[in-house]
Structures are given as C-alpha cells and as structure tokens.
Amino acid sequence: MTKKAVRKAVIPAAGLGTRFLPATKSIPKEMLPIVDKPAIQYVIEEAVAAGIEDVLIITSPSKRAIEDHFDRNVELETLLEARGKTPQLEEVLAIADMVKMHFTRQGQPLGLGHAIGMAADHVGDEPFAVLLPDDLMIDNGALLKRMIDLQAKEGGIVVAAGEYPVEEVVAYGVIDPLSVEDGVIVAKSVVEKPSIEDAPSNYGLTGRYVFPPEIFDEIAKTKPGVGGEIQITDAIDALTKSAGLRACLYSDGRYDAGQKLDFLRATVELALKHPTLGAPFADVVRTIAKDL
C-alpha cells in the first residue's frame, strides 16, 4: 500500500496564556506580535514551507482574533488600495491566501491530547503534523520537512527533540532512547516531566509532531491525568509499543514564545534579521548596551 503524504497540520491554540497576563486578558497570546507579525503567523509560514496544504487551528471562544487575522478584511483592503499602499495590500492578501484554513473550538481546557483528538474527523485516515504555537522554529520549515520525510519512510510517530541541560529537560517530555544516529533517535518511550533523578536522558520533546491516524484511537482510550487533562504524551507512549517512535534532533532556530524571556529574545534576534529594520535596530541595541 502506498503511504499517504502529510498534507494537513493541526495547531492547538486554545490555551489562556496566563503567563502573559495582563496582555492576554483580551488578546490571544498567539496574536502577540514578534516584530511585525503575530507569533502564530510564523508557525503557519513554517508549515507552508514544509509542504502543508491544509491547517486546522483548535481555538477557544475568546480567540476570534486568530480567525479574523487569517480571513479577508475587505474594508482594510479597500482603504489600502485607495491610498496606493500596494505593498501593504499585497501583504494582507497573502495572509488570507497562504493555505487552506479551518477552525474549531475546544469548549473546555481538557488538555493537549483532547485538543488534538478534536481533529479526528478533519484529518481522517491520513498522517498529519501537529505544531504547538508556543514553539517557534525559524528554519523555513526544514525540521518539519525532515520529520515528514522520516515518517513517510519509517512510519510510526516522529517527534522533534532538543538536547537540554538536565536541570531544564525535566520541564519537558523526556525521551528514553534506544539509539542515536545521524540526528535521529529511535526511542523506547517518553516520560512526562520526570525528576532529575528519574530522567532517562537529556533529550526533551519540542512542539512538533508527525502522527499516523492511529493516534486518535489512543487518545480516545487515554484517561484524564493531572488536572483532569488528557495528556498527548500518554497516547504517544501507548502507540509507541506498536507503531514505533523516532525523534529528529535540532540544534538551533527554536524560540519558546510561551516564556517571557525567550519571547523577548525572539523579538530582538528576529528584529536584527529583519530586511528593513535590522540595521537601524542594531544601532538602537548598541546604544542601549552602552548603558548596561
């Protein structure tokens, strides 16, 4: 049987963003700008660069702004056209046309596993990607494309992983590796946020996954854990026994936009690389640095 290509991606974006209060009281955390684009747009652009054609975003009732951002805004488009602002017009039109977009709402915060499970009818019997919007990968889709290619070749579950200091890795799902070769880990299992003493390695999961459709059956069987939430790590661990689990290692390009300090780091570093803002902003940074 010919394996189906990964065409669809799911982006769970229903969280409340409490770490960024009060900014996120009325603005979805995924819409907070990094330089001149909301954080979630970087994630969509990454998916498109990796070959994704169809994106389902899992939102919540308070996150209509995400849907509006990726929709047409005829009033704005008409104004930009009338004022001769052609580059800005082309930019806003491109946002609405970059990929097929779909939205559904997670009515209650029942966990990442539950949110991904809501995509079952949309995904059907195809393998699919999951991108967590707190994790920005600024690599033009290279890591996700590598994951998709590995899943097409080997099947099973493919995740992204980084190598972290052991005192940091315990905040992640941690891989228990069988082998590590050429940037790919063959994994025995995943342990969710172990203690330092119990961590099987210092390889921590990052928010990129490529799943076979069988993950939905495992999610449906997964019992709620801490806080009454359905953990995707539990479903991954269960499916690993029959389908296998591999991880693609990365070394750079990632920002944790769910943490204030890394959000600021992303803002500064991406501003320095911006085609028009980079040079003048570098002068600003040098001036600030003199006073530190």
Image: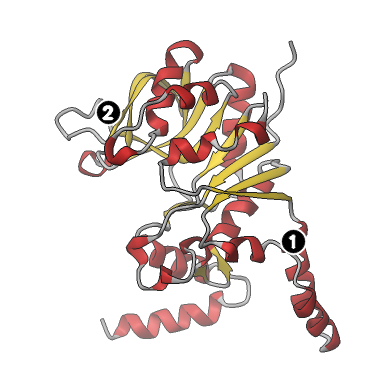
In percent of the image, x 58 and y 72: which residue is there?
36
The reply to whether residue 224 is visible in this rendering is yes
Q: Is 108 positioned to the left or the right of 176 in the image?
A: right
In percent of the image, x 81 and y 89: which residue is there?
83
Q: Is 82 positioned to the left or the right of 171 in the image?
A: right
Tell me the distance, in whole angstroms, between the alpha carbons under discs 2 and 1.
42 Å
Which quarter of the figure is the N terminus placed in? Answer: top right
Task: Give the percent coordinates (x, y) of residue 285.
Answer: 41, 79
Label at residue 96: 1
Q: Say which amino acid is labelled 2.
A: Ser
Task: Give the percent coordinates (x, y) of residue 177.
Answer: 35, 21
Labels 2 & 1 near each other (Cβ < 8 A) = no
For residue 241, what is the image quadrant?
top left
Q: Say which amino acid is labelled 1.
A: Ala
Front-most of residues 138 and 109: 109
The reply to whether residue 172 is visible in this rendering is no
Q: Secondary structure at mark 2?
A: loop
- Is tag 2's residue or tag 1's residue first in the polypeptide sequence? 1
Label at residue 201: 2
